[in-house]
Amino acid sequence: MRYNVGVRLSKSTLERRLVTIPALIAVAVTLTLTVPLWLPLTAVFDALRGRLRLPTVRLLAFGVCWAWLETAGVLAAFGLWISGQGRRQGLHYALQAWWAKNLLTALGATCGIRLEVDNVEAFTPGPAVLFVRHASLADSLVSAFVTTNLAGLRPRYVLKRELLLDPCLDVVGQRIPNYFLDRASTDSAPELAALERLTTGLGQHDIAIIFPEGTRANPRKREKSLEKIAEHDPERARKLSALRNLLPPRPSGAAAMMRGAPDVDVILAWHVGFEGLDTFGGILAALNRRPAPILFSARRVANSDVPRGRAFNEWLDRQWVRMDAEVGAAFASRHDNET
């Protein structure tokens, strides 16, 4: 497993942190000291381009908040380690909850983005395994806020290894039970075995989280994924051809997690509102209009209704087609409200 509570850091981890942590602090300090410079310049830039809501100003203001919240998280984690509390998972989960809450607060204060959660009751009681739609860079943030601050649970994430470049996630995320998946691995067996171990022994306050699509959805990725499925399973590709908003799920990781926790319920969740915020241009365009609330919706499926074996794969596909329709309905509702 990749959570290094109280163990010697590997050479690669140490080398990475010697670069990313100073870089983070430098960004925080530089953005703060140069506020008198970039604030008027970006305000004039936005005004000249007719961006009356000053999206560039808002984005940089959020950047300042993000950099200092990340820095505070790293410093707090260092304080826990230096005081001999590096093994206290409860304190690190509290730090994670603080980070998620304040980062969402910063998004609201600077960018006007707010979150609405439908059916938060679906998350309790624990334990459970959560399958979430992967739509944006903010998926982990939103799900972390909901599970920690609203549901009072301790999440165990499956995340891509590239996210270790985020210093706070690197330090804190490896002191609590998470697994950073190597998506480039040519041998999936060790990765799947790790996911199974991740969910073994889930307690009443625990929830394991995976994004079964594996990457953020867009039309090009959806078409490519369906073409690849059709090469070896035309019938599955036909059933999933109805997808318009989601990518086909990759069932192996989700199935491995269920093998590790064969007696828990499943929660399926999606959110809308962050679409298009994965590029700089998309972010500026979104922030230049008053953003609609981010809607996060979840439903719970009893363990007895979750099949095993190949039937699980077919069940997950059906759930994803249903989720795709729910996301489409949410989009249509928003469009109607805007017109």
Image (cartoon, helix red, strand yellow):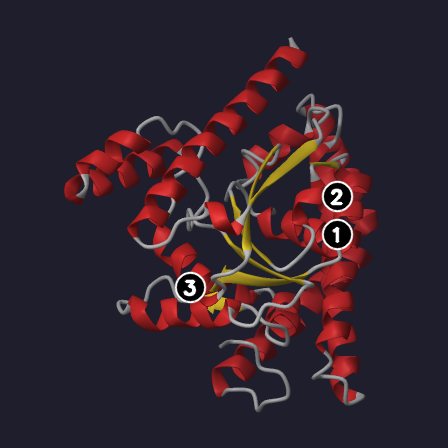
Q: Nearer the viewer, residue 186 or 24?
A: 186
Question: Which residue occupies 53% across, 27% down?
Answer: 326
* Residue highlighted by disc 2: 107
**What is the x, y in percent for residue 187?**
27, 69
- Left of 99 or right of it: where is 10? left
Counting the numbered discs, the total is 3
What's under tag 3, amino acid-wise? Arg
For label 2, the crowd category at 10 Å Cα-Cα, with few meaning under 14, some 14 to 19 and many 20 or more, is many
CA separation, marks 1 and 2? Answer: 6 Å
Question: Which residue occupies 53% across, 28% down?
Answer: 327
**Residue 258, can we see it?**
yes
In contact (CB < 8 Å): disc 1 and disc 2: yes
**Mark found first going from the N terminus, 3 or 2:** 2
**What is the x, y in percent for residue 15?**
53, 82
Tell me the number on the disc at residue 259: 3
CA separation, marks 3 and 2? Answer: 37 Å
Tell me the number on the disc at residue 293: none
**What is the x, y in percent for residue 110?**
79, 41
* Residue highlighted by disc 1: 103
**SS for callout 3:** helix
